[in-house]
Image (cartoon, helix red, strand yellow):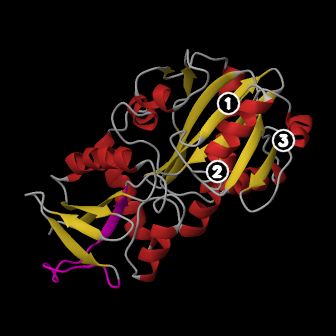
């Protein structure tokens, strides 16, 4: 008998539409092997979207579909980018119901989604990160002091946001003030990070058939000021997989990516971002629910490792079921 798989999509963040697209890719890849059900998660209500595109309301107290109370789920496939899919909330909810969820656990997701706390943790464990300061909407901050500590230009990043939403580059004092204000619209905490001139790389690390493996490395090149939303989703970048780099750099990127995956106790698939220059390898961020379309970076990397999207997704489901 086929297992019932819920594909979680939507969410509470600016990445809502991206999540819908990722979920459709997952649905198409898995529908022949499982009984797949699209689950739309919104701030007020959750719904099962049936094959006729009807929205069947879900009782959030027990995760029962109100018109299909007999339906029980064997596993939830997490395709929600941003909150509540990447910040631990959805994992915590389903843990209490004892329903497996693909990917990393609640605590690990909560830590990795918070750029400020994740950088602190990794830096304390020997991972090089850019110099930074943090500001909060709840506490007064001084622009001149930030500039003294970080210099210009610099990056301003909402601490809990993805897909480059809430991320800006500031070149002068006025821009910095404006960028902080805009970034605080996405989250109450903001990371202000030094600009590092170098080459950008993305490295996928996954658990596959019980082994943790590093996927072929991607170098990201863009004419934009940085790898922003347009570069990521509107074709304004070149993503070269596998990256044409030295054996030594490849070895070092693989080792640091594996170290980060294990330090953070991640599960399923992840994608870490780095800037590399003559001063070394600097960690930028890690994604625990990266883009899942065939054009997205991690699926590109898996393809070069001869792992199909379908096999990648099926593996993630069974890994999650076997954890319970």
Does 70 lie within the magenta span? yes
Q: Is residue 239 visible in the rendered structure shown here?
A: yes
Classify mark 2: residues with Cα within 10 Å, few (<14), some (14-19) or many (20+). Answer: many
The span from disc 1 to disc 2 (Cα, nearest Å) is: 14 Å
The kind of secondary structure element at disc 1 is: strand
Report the residue marked by disc 2: 184
Horizontal placement of 198 versus 24: left or right?
Answer: right
- Of the two numbered discs 3 and 1 on the same chain, state the one appearing first in sequence: 3
Label ID, residue 169: 1
> Of discs 1 and 2, which sits in the foreground?
2
**Image quadrant occupied by the C terminus:** bottom left
Horizontal placement of 40 versus 211: left or right?
Answer: left
Report the residue marked by disc 3: 143
Image quadrant of residue 109? bottom right
Position of residue 67 measured from the top left corner of the image (x, y, whole percent): 13, 79
Q: State which region is magenta.
A: 61-78
């Amino acid at each position: 008998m086929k297992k019932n798989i819920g594909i979680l999509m939507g969410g509470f963040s600016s990445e809502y539409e991206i999540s819908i697209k990722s979920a459709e890719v997952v649905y198409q890849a898995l529908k022949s092997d499982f009984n797949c059900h699209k689950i739309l998660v919104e701030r007020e209500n959750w719904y099962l979207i049936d094959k006729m595109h009807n929205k069947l309301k879900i009782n959030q107290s027990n995760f029962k579909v109100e018109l299909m109370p007999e339906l029980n789920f064997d596993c939830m496939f997490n395709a929600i980018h941003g909150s509540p899919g990447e910040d631990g909330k959805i994992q915590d909810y389903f843990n209490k119901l004892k329903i497996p969820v693909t990917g990393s656990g609640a605590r690990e997701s909560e830590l990795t989604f918070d750029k400020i706390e994740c950088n602190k943790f990794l830096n304390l464990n020997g991972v090089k990160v850019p110099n930074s300061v943090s500001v909060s909407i709840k506490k007064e901050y001084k622009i001149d002091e930030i500039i003294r500590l970080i210099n210009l230009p610099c990056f301003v990043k909402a601490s809990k946001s993805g897909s480059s939403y809430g991320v800006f580059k500031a070149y002068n004092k006025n821009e910095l003030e404006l960028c902080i204000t805009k970034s605080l619209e996405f989250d109450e905490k903001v990371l202000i990070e030094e600009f590092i001139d170098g080459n950008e790389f993305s490295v996928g690390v996954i658990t596959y058939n019980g082994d943790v493996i590093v996927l072929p490395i991607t170098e990201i090149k863009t004419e934009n000021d940085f790898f922003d939303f347009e570069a990521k989703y509107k074709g304004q970048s070149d993503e070269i997989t596998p990256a044409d780099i030295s054996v030594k750099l490849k070895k070092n990127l693989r080792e640091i990516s594996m170290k980060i995956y294990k330090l953070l106790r991640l599960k399923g698939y992840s994608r870490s971002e780095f800037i590399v220059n003559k001063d070394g390898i600097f960690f930028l961020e890690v994604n625990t629910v990266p883009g899942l379309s065939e054009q997205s970076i991690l699926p590109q990397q898996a393809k070069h490792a001869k792992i199909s999207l379908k096999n990648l997704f099926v593996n993630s489901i069974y890994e999650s079921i076997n954890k319970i």
